[in-house]
């Protein structure tokens, strides 16, 4: 199968998954306990207001009709209306998405170099002292609550030392870099151990791989073997994991942004949740899911580009 | 084929436990004892407000200091372990049981059940785990019970996926074919031959998952969507202390360290179990 | 030895080579020499240290291994070389090919690049020149359309083609010595014969010296002039191939020669054909669909693969019938269909005239007791969590033939019957050898006292001496329990020494059937002829009087 056919097949699958995602986000609000109209109107609303909302939002229609309306709206780019801001959710997302995007890319840039370095250091002598330390520190790193780390770092680096601002997004590229350093760092500290574990395991697995022995038997030096044979083969599983992790990071962003008061999608989500702004929650969930699916697709295509076996 | 791989002869003899496992078990046992005996060993009532001694730093009277309303942080950390430990079990067990059952059936029988499951799986992984749990809790309303419910609703899928993958390989193994050929009933094959061989990696995963569940639980407490104040829970305590972190770092520090140590217990145990699993496969 | 006789300096001299992993000595003071242009065979069973020896010569062992002694290539001691000098010799002066070509090729790089890599590295060629030579080499090792194939990836190659590519990569720099570690073991017999032919030609045309490591004495005898026999890390015997095979001095060599498939004829082959048809297979077809999930099915056409295509065969009561075929011939699909692990797409299987496919409930249970199977992989066919006594007792109590306690007693008797010592009964499969596991598999299959026993490649994962023992056991059991046997194997010589009638399978069809010995001596179908032709037989087979049936047990 050629790369183009693979892309075509994946895009076809994508349509199915997108349909599923919209169904889930739709049901999220409509299957919630209680009357959605009452939830939308708020606790103190009168009966007339509720009735008005019900007909305004089409909540008196059968469920499948409502879903159809929802789908049609989605296709025309309308993912709902915020009750609190009285603005389309898409506008809100457009306004809040940049800090989150910036933060995500920032985290990846901060996380990848130490990941590669530590994994190589550990895999060079599996079971050696360096390897054991990296492994244990990695395990410990996984258990740190990100929000706690954020608070502690902002107190130490932000308040005590005064090196970095502890909240906000700043202005301009360098301002963003400066303001988002602590949030990005807190996330990276949690991300690096996960990725290191994966890359290290993959590297160690490849050191004993038969084709590495064969390359050695053909006179390749250890350096050539590492860069030309082992690393490309070991990167594949880590690449997949990175895809999964970006999805996790979107979740992590919710917490980190809250701690550092970054005006991003995570903060928007938490405020919407606490303020019971359901259509914002629905719209954000949809956007998060769609971006996860797209990232996964990207990772899959990248994998197929590296690995000829996937394009069978 | 005829010759065993050279490496098989070189591999060191498999140890049954890894060196870190006793440490892990000691940590977990320690926290279990603390949770069980919290009322006996806690020096103060965790909810007793003492305005006079508010925000007092760690010292002889209050080992971990007091918070903004004068509650003893040490006592609260001890009491909170009951909530967080319970959270780990309640957050892991339902997905484990549901997921294992569905994965077993889906992997072994295949067909429509499997197809439906795989679609559900594709759909679930399309959502960032944390966001989906967040959204469900948001809709159901904040609270520990709703958090555990949302976790069960989303979490079973990864267990099912793991078990299914195990079962798919086991199903093709010759001892299952032999069992079918010997006319064992499917129920016996599943419970006696498939499950015992599939369950190892799942247990290892579940133990590691306990770390994630605890962190998620604490995060939800922190965001105000999980355990509700004034209930002592590590995440809630950290959230409480955040506003005062400049004057009183101890309110945040100690609950965090407690969470890390419990997490370390689960993570090291899960890591050890995972290593034993992998060795078992290669040995 | 040889070197002293001719007076020429040897190409490779291995003297007192010992290799240890910690406390375990894998190779103990091994010595041998290799002349330029010679092919030396190293033969031995698993754990004999033959692969470790050769990896020690190439210095390919991991850090845990300690090698002592002397390995001299053209007088240069390889064990004393530094990493850099070693890299200059590996692939340049010594080439190596391996048992499993599939896992020894880098899955991410094109075949042409991989063949060219050693030449670019050692001969200082440019990429373009390297690729040009790689194409030429691929042509030399018999790969058709080499230009196109050089751009393929390993997974697009068949097993035989992968091994050819490995050979091409190994000989690109025109090394003095080629080490071939079980180069044909993972391949089908007809492919094996062609690869061996290629190696022989290389040796004849270019004078390339070789060390061929194999568990198969037949393969070694086919192309080597000298042979080293190893066991438990030691050399038990060495010398010119004819001397060793015709006048073996060491008891182990004798055992090895006697265990070669086809050396013995087992008593069964001469029993007269009698009894009514027990199992009839009529026009059986089995297809597997290779659909790719819900959406794949919509996008592409779901094509199906026919594993069996209109197969007819009959097995009479008390008979031993053999089925021979290479991988993908459908022989295992047939076995799985008979025990209802596959659903046929057409045709019928009848046991005593009853349609097997229509059985259900009690009748199916009764069928299970009458037809049993032993599987190929000794370790995989036993549940790793059960002790062997539990595994053998399980069918007895599950079928309600006895309570659990009585079933345990019966299991002990069965284990004794397959000649397993009582002390092993509480062991798990992983604590047993492959041969012992196969005995457990036999005992378990016989626990229900079946009439028909299907044996699917039950010795293909075992050493030759173990294989001979299992076959003897099978013959004994068959006689004692008047079993009907369906014996499935890729090895025509085993089948014909063991069975009365044989069916030859190719690509899901029967191409030839008949009395076993006739099929072996006068094959009719071209494919069977190729199969017979590719049997690696010991040169002395025709001269020894073993054509007479050697009955091991008094009948």
Image: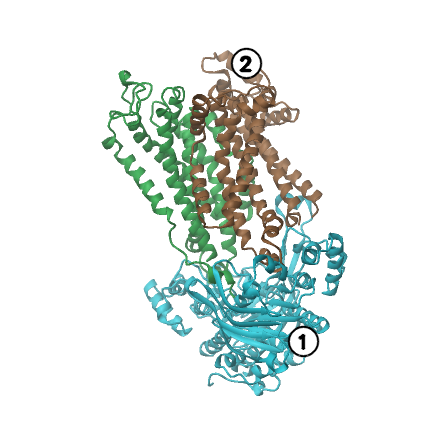
| Residue position marked by numbered label 1 in the rendering | C533
Closer to viewer: mark 1 or mark 2 = 1
- Residue A52 disc label: 2
**Residue nearest the observer in this picture, A74 or B110:** A74
Chain letter corresponding to the colour cyan: C
The colour applied to the residues of chain B in this rendering is: green
Picture coordinates of residue C302, whole percent (x, y): 67, 50
**Residue nearest the observer in this picture, C481 or C539:** C539
Can residue C484 be seen?
A: no
The colour applied to the residues of chain A in this rendering is: brown
Figure check: C224 above or below C554: above
Please report contact status of discs 1 and 2: CB closer than 8 Å, yes or no.
Answer: no
Picture coordinates of residue A179, whole percent (x, y): 53, 23
Figure check: B134 above or below C206: above
Task: Specify the quadrant of the image occupied by residue C340.
Answer: bottom right
Task: Specify the quadrant of the image occupied by residue A71.
Answer: top right
Picture coordinates of residue A18, whole percent (x, y): 61, 33
Badge 1 and badge 2 in a common chain: no
- 10 Å crowding of disc 1: few (<14), some (14-19), many (20+): some
Local secondary structure at mark 2 = helix
Picture coordinates of residue B262, whole percent (x, y): 36, 37
Local secondary structure at mark 1 = helix
Figure check: A220 above or below C518: above
């Amino acid at each position: 199968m050629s790369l183009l056919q693979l892309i075509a097949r994946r895009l076809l699958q994508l349509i199915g998954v997108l349909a599923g995602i919209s169904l889930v986000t739709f049901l999220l609000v409509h299957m919630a306990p209680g009357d959605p109209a009452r939830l939308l109107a708020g606790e103190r609303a009168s009966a007339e207001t509720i009735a008005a909302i019900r007909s305004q939002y089409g909540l008196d229609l059968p469920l499948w009709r409502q879903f159809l309306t929802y789908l049609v709206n989605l296709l025309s780019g309308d993912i709902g209306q915020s009750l609190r801001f009285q603005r389309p959710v898409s506008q809100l997302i457009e306004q809040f998405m940049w800090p989150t995007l910036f933060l995500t890319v920032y985290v990846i840039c901060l996380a990848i170099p130490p990941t590669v370095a530590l994994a190589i250091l550990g895999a060079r002598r599996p079971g050696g002292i360096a390897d054991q330390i990296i492994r244990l520190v990695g395990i410990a790193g996984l258990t740190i609550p990100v929000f706690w780390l954020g608070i502690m770092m902002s107190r130490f680096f932000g308040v005590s030392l005064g090196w970095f601002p502890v909240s906000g997004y700043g202005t301009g590229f360098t301002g963003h870099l400066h303001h988002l350093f602590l949030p990005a760092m807190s996330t990276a500290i949690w991300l690096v151990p996960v990725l290191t574990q994966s890359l290290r395991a993959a590297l160690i697995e490849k050191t004993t791989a038969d084709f590495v022995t064969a390359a050695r038997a053909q006179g390749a030096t250890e350096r050539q073997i590492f860069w030309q044979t082992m690393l490309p083969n070991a990167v594949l599983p880590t690449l997949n994991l990175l895809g999964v992790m970006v999805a996790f990071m979107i979740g992590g962003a919710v917490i980190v942004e809250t701690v550092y008061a970054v005006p991003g999608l995570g903060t928007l989500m938490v405020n919407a949740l606490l303020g019971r702004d359901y259509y914002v929650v629905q719209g954000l969930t949809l956007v998060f899911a769609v971006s996860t699916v797209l990232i996964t697709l990207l990772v899959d295509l990248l994998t197929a580009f590296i690995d000829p076996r996937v394009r069978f | 084929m005829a010759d065993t791989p050279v490496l098989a002869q070189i591999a060191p003899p498999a140890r049954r436990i890894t060196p870190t496992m006793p440490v892990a078990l000691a940590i977990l046992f320690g926290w279990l004892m603390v949770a069980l005996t919290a009322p006996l060993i806690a020096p103060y009532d965790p909810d007793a407000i003492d305005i006079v001694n508010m925000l007092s730093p760690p010292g002889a009277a209050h080992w971990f200091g007091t918070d903004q309303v004068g509650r003893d942080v040490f006592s609260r950390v001890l009491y909170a372990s009951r909530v967080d430990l319970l959270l780990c079990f309640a957050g892991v067990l339902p997905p484990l049981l549901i997921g294992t059952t569905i994965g077993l059936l889906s992997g072994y029988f295949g067909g429509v059940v499997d197809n439906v499951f795989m679609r559900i799986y594709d759909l679930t992984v399309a959502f960032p785990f944390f966001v989906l749990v967040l959204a469900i809790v948001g809709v159901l309303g904040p609270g520990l019970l709703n958090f555990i419910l949302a976790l069960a609703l989303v979490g079973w899928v990864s267990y099912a996926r793991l078990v299914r993958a195990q079962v798919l390989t086991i199903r093709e193994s010759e001892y299952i074919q032999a069992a079918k050929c010997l006319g064992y009933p499917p129920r016996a094959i599943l419970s006696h031959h498939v499950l015992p061989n599939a369950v190892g990696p799942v247990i290892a995963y579940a133990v590691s998952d306990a770390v994630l569940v605890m962190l998620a639980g604490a995060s939800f407490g922190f965001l105000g969507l999980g355990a509700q104040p004034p209930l002592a829970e590590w995440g809630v305590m950290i959230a409480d202390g955040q506003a005062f972190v400049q004057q009183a770092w101890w309110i945040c520090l100690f609950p965090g360290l407690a969470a890390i140590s419990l997490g370390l217990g689960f993570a090291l145990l899960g890591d050890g179990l995972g290593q034993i699993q992998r060795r078992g496969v290669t040995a | 030895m040889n070197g002293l006789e001719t007076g020429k300096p040897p190409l490779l001299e291995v003297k007192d080579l010992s290799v240890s992993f910690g406390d375990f000595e894998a190779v103990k003071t091994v010595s041998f020499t290799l002349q330029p242009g010679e092919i030396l065979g190293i033969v031995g069973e698993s754990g004999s240290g033959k692969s470790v020896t050769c990896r020690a010569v190439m210095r390919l062992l991991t850090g845990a291994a300690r090698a002592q002694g002397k390995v001299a290539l053209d007088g240069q001691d390889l064990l004393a070389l530094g990493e850099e000098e070693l890299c200059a010799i590996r692939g340049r002066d010594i080439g190596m090919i391996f048992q499993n070509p599939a896992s020894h090729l880098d899955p991410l790089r094109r075949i042409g690049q991989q063949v060219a890599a050693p030449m670019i590295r050692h001969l200082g060629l440019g990429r373009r020149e390297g690729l040009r030579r790689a194409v030429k080499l691929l042509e030399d090792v018999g790969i058709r359309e080499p230009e196109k194939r050089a751009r393929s990836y390993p997974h697009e190659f068949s097993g035989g083609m992968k091994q050819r590519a490995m050979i091409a990569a190994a000989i690109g720099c025109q090394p003095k010595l080629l080490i071939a570690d079980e180069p044909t073991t993972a391949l089908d017999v007809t492919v094996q014969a062609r690869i061996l032919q290629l190696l022989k030609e290389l040796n004849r045309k270019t004078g390339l010296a070789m060390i061929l490591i194999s568990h198969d004495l037949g393969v070694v005898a086919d192309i080597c002039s000298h042979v080293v026999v190893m066991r438990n890390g030691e050399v038990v015997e060495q010398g010119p191939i004819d001397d060793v095979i015709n006048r073996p001095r060491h008891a182990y060599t004798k055992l090895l020669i006697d265990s070669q498939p086809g050396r013995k004829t087992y008593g069964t082959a001469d029993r007269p054909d009698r009894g009514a048809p027990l199992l009839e297979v009529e026009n059986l077809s089995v297809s597997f669909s290779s659909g790719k999930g819900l959406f794949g099915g919509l996008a592409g056409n779901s094509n199906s693969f026919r594993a069996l295509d209109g197969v007819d065969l009959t097995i009479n009561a008390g008979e031993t019938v053999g089925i021979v075929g290479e991988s993908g011939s459908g022989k295992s699909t047939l076995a799985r269909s008979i025990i209802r692990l596959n659903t046929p797409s057409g045709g019928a299987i009848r046991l005593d005239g009853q349609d097997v496919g229509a059985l259900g409930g009690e009748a199916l249970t009764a069928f299970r007791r009458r037809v049993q199977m032993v599987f190929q992989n000794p370790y995989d066919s036993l549940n790793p969590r059960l002790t062997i006594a539990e595994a053998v007792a399980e069918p007895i109590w599950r079928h309600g033939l006895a309570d659990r306690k009585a079933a345990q007693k019966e299991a002990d008797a069965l284990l004794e019957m397959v000649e397993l010592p009582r002390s092993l009964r509480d062991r798990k499969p992983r604590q047993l050898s492959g041969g012992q596991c196969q005995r457990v598999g036999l005992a378990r299959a016989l626990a229900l006292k079946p009439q028909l026993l299907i044996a699917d490649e039950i010795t293909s994962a075992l050493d030759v001496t173990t294989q001979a023992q299992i076959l003897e056991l099978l013959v004994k059991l068959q006689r004692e329990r008047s079993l009907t046997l369906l014996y499935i194997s890729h090895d025509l010589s085993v089948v014909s020494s063991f069975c009365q009638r044989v069916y030859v399978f190719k690509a899901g069809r029967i191409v030839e059937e008949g009395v076993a010995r006739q099929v072996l001596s006068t094959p009719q179908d071209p494919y069977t002829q190729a199969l017979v032709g590719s049997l690696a037989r010991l040169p002395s087979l025709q001269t020894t009087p073993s054509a007479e049936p050697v009955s091991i047990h008094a009948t």
